[in-house]
Image (cartoon, rainbow, N blue to C red):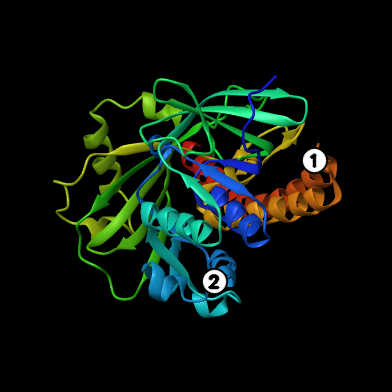
Amino acid sequence: MFPDGEISDVVVIGGGPAGAICALALARAGVDVKLMYWGGYAPGGIELVSGRGRYFIEQYCPDFFSEVVHGIEIHETASLWDTAEPVIFNAMFNPWGAGVAIERSLLDGALRNLASGAGGTIIPDAKVVGVERQHDRWRLIARSSQDAPSNETTSGAGECASYARFIVLATGRVPLPFFDHAPVAESSQIALMTSLQARIAPGHTLYIEGTRSGWWYALPAEKGYFVGFCIERDELKQRQSRLKDFFFQELQSTRLLAPLSAGAFAQRPISGRTAGATMFPTMGGDAWIAVGDATAAPDPLSGTGIEWAIESAQLGADMLLEALQKSEGNVLFDLPRYENAIRQRVAAQEKTAAYHYHRLKEIRETKET
């Protein structure tokens, strides 16, 4: 049996946009919710919040991007996929309005603050190292550098125990070993990223360019651009030069991005992150569900990563709230209905990304023949 202690309705594991929005939605509805997150998983860098994602966030906080955290509006997208001239998409044709390029750590922190202000309990620097289920509750052991709150029991040196009726996984592409929750297949792509202190072209523009080796994107930042290069793992392994040299050699062969980065070689180190779409075979189980990238991680080319995190988190929170209101003891969550809704939304997003990858495949086949 578990020791006596206060049991939260929900514990959210993960402090990114999905976890923060899920905790915010539940807290605003009066649910006793805790959010535990460990900063070691924070991705960093610049993220694009699509116009639709921006709309979702501003439903919770209308002045979020004007007063709470500032970013750079993206007014158009210039795309080049082996065409004679770049294709320019003006944000005015987007019914949701302009997207925003924003520092990811600032976005995550601001969303967690909203959840806290709504009544959620935020437990920072908490790495979940143990999960156990018995009867109608979960027992989570987290290792933290913070002092355990007074309503939690101490489990060991530097560890604390929390209790919950329901768990929400918002752990992104990183599955927790305590759940049968691993991606169908590891993504075959890697995104290499860095910040460039380069001259800013007129206007606030997102650049996307396809090449034989992969595809590039550049988001405007405060003093230049945040640049990413998505490439197949196997092709990356075949490079003959240092990673940094390889990155800039490939960058200089682009047509759209090279002029933006002229002379910008003494920059920050190159970092890497898993890219490409990732799908998890299950969205939940006995008294737990996943949200955000822990359900399906969109391809970054679509620019809908943050949008998807928020939409799936809101969907999960709405259905979980419905289950909490109807049940006593065990949370009778309608998992098949949730999974079906998630898969329908994923299928719609995949249609958008499929166009770009089909086009890139045509480019490669043409050049190889």
- Describe the element under mark 1 as helix, strand or loop: loop
Q: Quadrant of the N terminus?
A: top right
In this rendering, does residue 188 appear at all? Answer: yes
For the residue marked with disc 1, what is the amino acid?
A: Val
Q: Between residue 268 and residue 164, name the one nearer to us.
A: 164
For the residue marked with disc 2, what is the amino acid?
A: Glu
Q: Are marks 2 and 1 in contact (CB under 8 Å)?
A: no
Could you tell which of marks 2 and 1 lies nearer the N-terminus?
A: 2
Q: Picture coordinates of residue 348 (x, y %)?
A: 71, 54
Q: Picture coordinates of residue 315 (x, y %)?
A: 71, 54
The image quadrant of residue 290 is top right
The residue at the far bottom in this view is 92
Distance between mark 2 and mark 1 Cα atoms:
30 Å
- Describe the element under mark 2 as helix, strand or loop: helix
Q: Between residue 184 and residue 357, name the one nearer to us.
A: 184
Q: Using a 10 Å C-alpha cutoff, classify the residue at mark 2 as few (fewer than 14 neighbours), some (14 to 19) or many (20 or more).
A: few
Identify which residue is drawn at 73% across, 49% down.
Answer: 347
Q: Please name the residue that numbered disc 2 is placed on.
A: 58
Q: Picture coordinates of residue 120 (x, y %)?
A: 55, 53
Residue 290 left/right relative to 244 = right
Q: Picture coordinates of residue 259 (x, y %)?
A: 24, 60
Q: Between residue 74 and residue 106, name the one nearer to us.
A: 106
Identify which residue is drawn at 59% across, 71% down.
Answer: 59
Point out which mark residue 331 bears: 1
Residue 348 left/right relative to 245 = right
